[in-house]
Structure formats: structure tokens, C-alpha cells
Image (tube, rainbow, N blue to C red):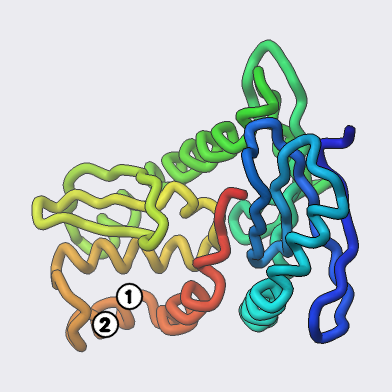
Amino acid sequence: MNPESWIEIVLSDKSFLKVRLIRNKRSKRLSIKVDRSGISVMSPVNEDIATIRNFINHNNAWILKKTKFYAKLNNKLDYSPLQKDEIIYLGKKYKMNFVKDTFQYTILSENLMKITFHVNDRRTYNRNIINWYREQTKKLLENKVPFFGKMLSISYGKVGVRSQKLRWGSCSKKGNLNFNLLLSALPINIIDYIIIHELFHLVEFNHSDHFWKLVGDAFPTYKYCRDWLKKNGAFLQVH
């Protein structure tokens, strides 16, 4: 039995949608997930299609409400929603490919717009993606934070990379800086804005008018970057 397939449903507003059906031997019951990429149903391996369709129909109103919500959000994105086999790096969309191999390494092809992950175990692909993002973000920060620190004459402490859902960057009163491991998913100008933003927090530990004047003098397009993050930032995530 194919562990992943598609079924078509009709919502209460008469619209047709395809639902990704994922059969998982660890699933004890049916569950539905609706997000910016679409609708998926997680099912026990031997659950029959009629039961799955009844479960979906029972939750029809909730699904319609959620799909409309995410449709509005997706319409505001600068790019179409990420599919399961897609990844964003430096603001560009790439296809992902996973190859089972003895050694773990990654090949990025600009010509093909594809990133190939050579992995020991394809079942842990999420971990490989997260580790790859962490490495790319560290490399960016190693170059950019010293550059902007020197340019702005701002000294700082340790620079760390963290898995943070709600923040792209943060700083402590000890002068340490932390950045989201997905920072390398963002366009370069947005990355620069976030780094400058956090560096100025070591001068002004708030969001006062004076803080924004400092940021604006150093980075005149900060308002565009701030708006871009509000519109797109929450949807840059590892599936």
C-alpha cells in the first residue's frame, strides 16, 4: 500500500480540493492538518477510504475555514507556498533531493535550482535540513556580524544560532547575539537588516524613536524589510 497518496474532496462551498493522505504505522487515529501548503490527513495504515472520507466530511466546515484563512495569507506572500520537496535559501526557491549515502554532504546547484542532500537515513531528512540551515547561517554570521559591527562601531559578545519559532534575532544585556537558524533562508537584504537591528539593540535596548532613527540612518530601507518579515517571515519553516 502506498504510504502517501491523494484523494479529492468537495467542501461545503462546493469547491474541489486534493488532500494528501499519509498512512503511518505509528498513527493510532485519524488526524487532519491544514497549513499554507494545503491539506493532509494522517491515517493508520489499514484504515479504509470510506472511513477516511467520512472523517473528512465530518470536519468539512473546519477545513473550509482553515483553507480560506491560509489562502488569504498566501495571497500576501512574495512567492507561492513551499511544497514538501521545496526549500528556500537566500530568498530563492530550490527543489530538494535526498540520496542515501555512506557520507553526509550537500550539493547546491544554481543552474538546476536544486539542493541534493546525501544522507545516511532518508527518514531523518528534517534533521538534515535543520543542520544544513544551521551551518549556512553560521557561515553568514561569521562574515556579516564582524563587518557590520566594525562599520557601526558596536562591540558585541558571543554570536549564537538557535532554533527559534517567533524571533529572527535577540540580544542579551551581556552583549551576546543570537539568531534564528533559518536566517539563511531569507534574502540578503533582510538578513543584513536583522543583524543591524540586533546590533543597535546593544546601544538602545528597546524600540524607541531613537532606536529606529539609528537603524534608519544606517539602513534606510529598514521599513521595507520590517514589512517583508511581517508578511513572509512566519511561513519560512522546515516541513
What residue is shown with label 2? Answer: 212
* Amino acid marked by disc 2: Trp
Specify whether residue 87 is in view. Answer: yes
Q: From the viewer's perspective, is residue 43 above or below residue 77?
A: above
> Which residue shows up at 88% across the image and 74% down it?
16
- Mark 2, Cα crowd under 10 Å, few <14 / some 14-19 / many 20+, is some
**Could you tell me residue 40's position as x and y percent?**
73, 56
> Which residue shows up at 47% across the image and 40% down it?
134
| Front-most of residues 220 and 4 | 4
> Which residue shows up at 53% across the image and 42% down it?
133
Q: Using the numbered discs, state the Cα–Cα distance from disc 2 to disc 1 in whole angstroms.
A: 10 Å
Q: Quadrant of the N terminus?
A: top right
> Which residue shows up at 20% across the image and 67% down it?
201
Q: Nearer the viewer, mark 2 or mark 1?
A: 2
Q: From the viewer's perspective, is residue 19 above or below residue 23?
A: below
Q: What is the secondary structure assignment of the residue under circle 2?
A: helix
- Mark 1, Cα crowd under 10 Å, few <14 / some 14-19 / many 20+, is some
Specify whether residue 78 is in view. Answer: no
Q: From the viewer's perspective, is residue 125 above or below residue 85?
A: above
**Extreme left residue here?**
174
**Extreme top residue here?**
102
**Could you tell me residue 239's position as x and y percent?**
62, 49
What residue is shown with label 1? Answer: 218
> Are the residues flagged by discs 2 and 1 in contact, CB closer than 8 Å?
no
Q: What is the secondary structure assignment of the residue under circle 1?
A: helix
